[in-house]
Image (spheres, grey):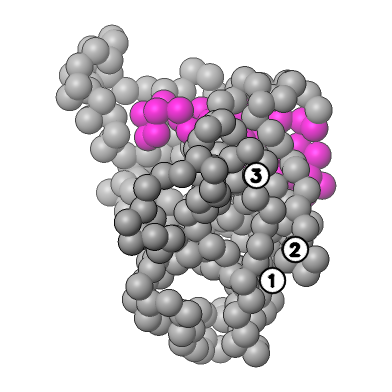
Amino acid sequence: MKKLLVVGLLAFVLSGCKSAFTDVSKEVTYSDIVLPDSEHSYVATWLSGNTIIFLKYLNYTDFDPEFRFDPSTLVVHEEMYSYNVDTQEWIKLNPDPMPKCHAQDIQSLQRLPNGKLGLVQSCCGPIFLDILQEFDISSQTMQVLFRNNVSPYVTLRWIGPYAHSPDMTEWIQEYPIGRYLNNQLFYIKLGEKPQRIVPDFLRAMTPAWSPHSREVAFWGTASYHGDNDPEINYTWDLVGIASYPWDLYISSPEGDDVHLVLSSIDNPGDIAWSPTRNGLAFSGTLK
């Protein structure tokens, strides 16, 4: 394994009427971004040199102050916008709604290796379905990358964070079963059955595929036995696991050659590889 530079970064929470971005390719400067609606929370994803994608979280009351679920209508819990840093122009994006779905979520936005936007659409009723999509913001068209209800992918009931290889023929998919308790990671090759990696780990999440090599970084916990108990049987064990620090690992995409990088990270967030050097950035608290 190559020598690795690990950089811990503070996470930004975008809220209120203004947020800020930083261009670190030049001398550090700051510019305010005036959000179109200060009453909601936003999550930002940098897509290209001058384009940021914002996901705006809505409330049921945005549709009707006396909201009652109506299965004949489509309820979307988020709106998506692109923001041009140079022109300060906002454009509302309109991803295709999921068919036969009456309550839809959008999550896990990220820039794909081909420069397009990746996102997960989830149907919360009357059917339960997750679809990993590729979204082209210029044409506002989508292409399905992964569905969890078709062979050979039916192993995964839910889709969590994901990380593609540079040519997008392989990826690591998180299965967020038991959030923060026993999350699992799967290696997927296009058209083939998912294979779980590090199956002996108690939990693993938030994969990040290196743009320079066949290496994947992820958060994991190799083992946890509470008060030296061989099994997890009690509620306080579950609470202990959920609040237990995570470790940062690197392995091959297939889960071989696992290396521990850092131990005891609280509140771990996304992991990102440097595009120009063999380094990692992440959000979290190093104990």
Residue 98 marker = 3
Name the residue carrying label 1: 48
Q: Assign the N terminus to one quadrant of the image.
A: top right
Compare residues 1 and 143 and report the one nearer the observer: 143
At x 64%, y 76%, the residue is: 91
In the picture, measured across the screen, residue 231 lies left or right of residue 120, that is left
Give percent across and percent down for residue 277: 66, 61
In the picture, measured across the screen, residue 36 lies left or right of residue 112, that is left
Q: Which residues are magenta?
A: 161-190
Cα distance in 3D space between marks 3 and 2: 15 Å
Q: Secondary structure at mark 3?
A: loop
Figure quadrant of residue 13 = bottom left
Give percent across and percent down for residue 262: 42, 44
The local crowd at label 1, few if under 14, some if 14 to 19, many if 20 or more residues have their Cα within 10 Å, is: few
Compare residues 62 and 242 and report the one nearer the observer: 62
Q: Is residue 28 above or below residue 265?
A: below
Q: Is residue 255 above or below residue 35?
A: above
Name the residue carrying label 2: 140
